[in-house]
Image (tube, rainbow, N blue to C red):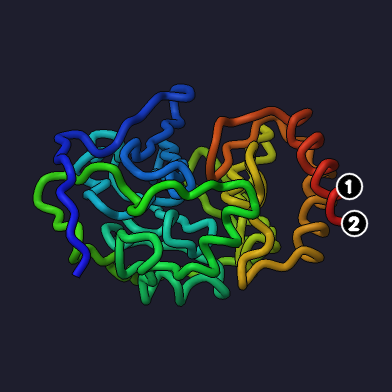
Amino acid sequence: MLRRMMRVVDRWFERTSVDDAITLLWEPHVVELMRCNIWHVRGRDRDLLVDTGMGVSSLVDAAGDLFGGSVTAVATHGHDDHIGGHHEFDDVVAHPLEAQLLERAPLRSLHIETAWGREVIDGLTASGYALEHEWFVDALPAGVVLETFRQRPARVTRLVDEGDVIDLGDRRFEVLHLPGHSPGSIGLWEAATGTLFSGDAIYDGPLLDELPESDIDAYCRTMERLLTLPVRVVHGGHDPSFDGDRLRELARAYLARRR
C-alpha cells in the first residue's frame, strides 16, 4: 500500500466575497488542476451552490455561515474535482448525462496515478497541465486518512437540461447545455445581470477537450453559442473570473485552433 506522511491543516477552504450575494470558495491544498471554483449565491428564498470541490473536508461545516437556509447544489458536470461535496446537500441538480457520476462518486484514491492511470496523466500533461505531484493534495484536514479516502456518492434529486430554470426567489438562472468538455456540461445564465456560471465549458486557462468523454465538434458549437450571449461577467469552474470581451477572445481562439 502507498504510504505518505502529510501535514495536517486546520483550515481546508478559503473564500472571498465577489459582491453582496456571491462568494467564491476554493481548496488551497488541492493541486491546481483539481482546485475548482465553488460558487455560493445567496437568494431570497434559497441559496445556490455551483459545484462543491473534492469532498476532502466538509463544505457545510466550513461555510455553513453563508447558507441562509435551503441550498440547491448544482453540478456543472460530473468530474471528480466538482462533485465531492454534493452528498452533503438534500437538493442536488445535474444534467442527465452527468448524474450517474455523482451517484457513483468515481474518485477512489488521492494518489493521482492510482486514481487515473498513466494514459490520462500523459494526456493532461499534453494539454498544458504538468502534473508534478504524486497526490491530489499537499495537506489533509484533521481526521482524513490519505490512503483510505473515497468520495461519497450523492443523490441527484433533479435532472435539468437546456432551458430549465434554477429559481432563488429574487434571481433566476437558466440552464444552458454546453457540451464538449463533457457530454452533459451545463452553465447557469442570469440574463438580468449578464452573469454566466460556466463550469468547465470555458475558463481562462487551458481547456480540456481530449478527455475520453470530450467532443471537440460539440465544444466548437458551444463556443459559437457563447459568442452570441450578451455576457457581462463569467464565473468559471477554474481560474479568475473575466468579462464578456475576454469570453469572446477565448472562444474565438478556441475556434481558430480547432476548426
In the displayed structure, does residue 136 sit left or right of residue 239?
Answer: left
Is residue 98 shown above or below 131? below
Is residue 199 shown above or below 147? above
Where residue 86 appears, as percent x and y from the top left, is: 34, 59
Please tell me which residue is depicted at 69% across the width and 28% down the height of the picture: 243
* Residue type, mark 2 in image: Arg
Residue 43: in sight, yes or no?
no
For residue 113, what is the image quadrant?
A: bottom left
Please tell me which residue is depicted at 30% across the width and 65% down the height of the picture: 109
Where residue 182 appears, as percent x and y from the top left, is: 62, 65
On residue 223, the disc is: none
Q: Can you identify the residue that label 1 sits on?
A: 256
In what element is the residue under mark 2? Answer: loop
In the displayed structure, does residue 142 sit left or right of residue 79?
Answer: left
In the displayed structure, does residue 84 sit left or right of residue 183?
Answer: left
Where residue 246 appears, as percent x and y from the top left, is: 74, 30
In the displayed structure, does residue 21 sit left or right of residue 195?
Answer: left
Q: Are marks 1 and 2 in contact (CB under 8 Å)?
A: yes
Please tell me which residue is depicted at 38% across the width and 38% down the height of the picture: 26
126 or 174, which is in the foreground? 126
* Residue type, mark 1 in image: Ala
The quarter of the picture where the C terminus appears is bottom right
Label 1 packing within 10 angstroms: few (<14), some (14-19), many (20+): few
In what element is the residue under mark 1? Answer: helix
Please tell me which residue is depicted at 56% across the width and 47% down the height of the picture: 129
Q: Can you identify the residue that label 2 sits on?
A: 259
For residue 219, what is the image quadrant?
A: bottom right
